Image (cartoon, rainbow, N blue to C red):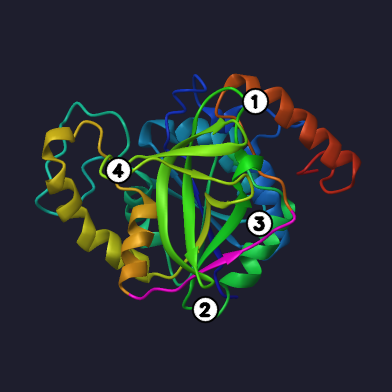
Amino acid sequence: MNEKTLVILAAGMGSRFGGLKQIEVVGPNNEFIIDYSIYSALKYGFNKIVFIIKEENESIFKETIGNRISKYVKVEYAYQKNDDVVSGINIPSDRVKPLGTAHAIYCARKYLNGNFGVITSDDFYGDDAFRVLSNNLDNTNDYIIVGYPIKSTMSENGSVKRGIIIEKDGKVIDIIESSCEIENDKIKCTPLDSSKDIFYIEANHPCSMLMNGFTKNILNTIEYTMLDEFNKHLDDLDNFELLLPDIMSKDIKNGQNIKVVTTTSTWMGITYKEDLDKLKKFISNSINDGIYPNNLWN
């Protein structure tokens, strides 16, 4: 059986939420967001899960999610370590913050064979989104973005980071990682790259919620980009992150085709604690509608 791997980014600190969002209970039988993602991933053909975590969180991940999931699917653990970088980069030894989503994928490189999907551990993507990702991941040289209308991904409780998809003639020409907030009837986007100007987009503009599909080619781009990008930010090595949207933008310039696919799913997140009750209610309604069983693993 061919491997179809789903990579789950779970090394983030969850600072704004106030702890490990990845193990916050959201379902009626102590399910986490990760449970719902994995349940749908298995349903639509994924057969290997790679958790990217901090090494010090391994025991809590195995106790709370890994051990029960391993009964149903092959599970691997990759550690996102700040010293796992290409030669020539000297990250400050006292830096605690992970080095970014692209670096996380680099740290999982030995577990990746062929095309693979990527999600975050603390976002709820919806069942249909995994069907769409799985169906578009087979036998393709394209990268995949599962796009969501940005207004549906916003929080009423503060600004959020989003990868804004810029398209022209049906092709993705850029992905601008931005801090976004609602301003009147539009979305104000402040690029994390300070050299880019603030811009405004409509409520239905597509954004990337880090639900992507990749070929192994992205590992090569991450590796050769890493040294150059960190050396450009020698004055900010305590904070600079190597992000997947930036790597994807570089590959676009090198001729890589990126396909944006749509889903009927609703994205939900818990950037702030106030978002938690809304997500729990959404999951309860989804169970009542028959999308998920009341108990995912029994």
Closer mark to the observer between disc 3 and disc 2? 2
Q: Position of residue 265 (x, y in %)?
A: 73, 51
Between circles 1 and 3, the one closer to the viewer is 1
Q: Where is mark 1, residue-wise?
A: 275
Q: Residue at x 57, y 42 (%)?
A: 66
Of the numbered discs 4 and 1, the one sitting upstream in the chain is 4
Is residue 58 at least partly visible in the picture?
yes
Q: Residue 64: say if magenta.
A: no
The residue that label 4 is drawn on is 193
Res. 98 mark: none
Residue 294 visible in the displayed image: no
**Secondary structure category for the residue under label 2:** loop
Q: Earlier in the sequence, mark 1 or mark 2?
A: 2
Viewer-side label of 4, 1: 4
Say what secondary structure mark 4 lies in: loop
Residue topped by disc 2: 140
Q: Which amino acid, mark 4?
A: Asp
Which class describes the residues within 10 Å of circle 2: few (<14), some (14-19), or many (20+)?
A: few
Residue on which the image places disc 3 = 41
